[in-house]
Image (spheres, rainbow, N blue to C red):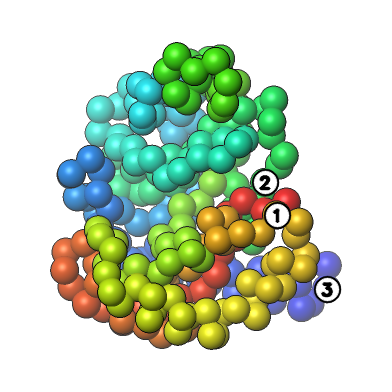
Amino acid sequence: MSSGRGGAIRGRAAQWRYTLEVSVLVDFDGERLEVAAAAGLTASHAEQIRQAVYDGRLLRFPDPAWRCVYLGAGEEKACFGVRDTDGRMFVLEVIDERTYLNGRFVGGTYFGDHRVPGLSGVPKSAGATIGLRFTGLVRARQWVHGHEWARFGWRPDRASRLDALLTGYLRLFLGGRYDRYRRQYSDVHERNVMFEVRPARARGVPVLARDLAGRVRLVRVGLQPIDLR
């Protein structure tokens, strides 16, 4: 491994130390709770994950204090944000191995794979005969706070007339990196690259944004690919 590569890894680790220090509000079915990105998962997390079930909309766990929010789905998996008892947030990718093309969380950290019996042979949409059907493989990874490349939101709870202005501003600075991803990977689009919202003292493009509590804050924004191949 070259010294340049090592420097990139150390820089990424420093960035996540910044992220872990900052809590943000996330809406869980109308319940707004503070979360911070998890740096890793423990054996007790693994035990909860292996007992997960799907209620047709969200994942459910034995620990009633755990919360879940649906993040989105494609042809190969559905992604759910999960908040543990301590307010640490991570993502579970619930996979359909029949169509899995190994879309990767580029530059981020995976926490491990799990076999979940309660998620084997389960359709994402109840009663569907075709489409996404979970096969029991669940992949845990870091959670990224942000917005899809398609639109940066001035506020996280609704669209705003400022969204287009902020999106255009950020694309002026980050468009070159987005284009490099497009040259390097075969399936890059507006939904699998995110504007990652970082603390004001982290690296990134400075921008003002409003949080769920209505507070206007200075943040930094970078790019984070979440499903490239």
Q: Identify the element where label 1 is drawn.
A: loop
The residue identified by callout 3 is 2
Image coordinates of residue 223 in percent, x first then y, are 55, 70
- In the image: residue 206, left or right of residue 95: left
| Residue at 25% from the left image edge and 49% from the top image edge | 27
The vertical placement of 99 against 41, above or below, is above
Q: Identify the element where label 3 is drawn.
A: loop
- In the image: residue 181, left or right of residue 151: right
- Rendering quarter of residue 226: bottom right
Image coordinates of residue 222 in percent, x first then y, are 51, 74
At label 1, the amino acid type is: Asp
User: 174 or 112, which lies in front?
Assistant: 174
Asked if residue 202 can be seen in this view, the reply is no
| Residue at 70% from the left image edge and 67% from the top image edge | 181
The vertical placement of 190 against 101, above or below, is below
The vertical placement of 102 against 25, above or below, is above
| Residue found at the very far right of the displayed protein | 1
Q: Distance between the residues labelled 1 and 2?
A: 9 Å
The residue identified by callout 1 is 187
The residue identified by callout 2 is 103
Image coordinates of residue 54 in percent, x first then y, are 40, 22
Q: Around disc 3, counting alpha carbons within 10 Å, would you say few (fewer than 14), some (14 to 19), or many (20 or more)?
A: few
At label 3, the amino acid type is: Ser
User: 14 or 150, which lies in front?
Assistant: 150
Q: Which callout, 2 or 3, points at the residue further toward the start of the chain?
A: 3
Asked if residue 160 can be seen in this view, the reply is yes
Q: Which callout, 1 or 3, points at the residue further toward the start of the chain?
A: 3
Q: Around disc 2, counting alpha carbons within 10 Å, would you say few (fewer than 14), some (14 to 19), or many (20 or more)?
A: some
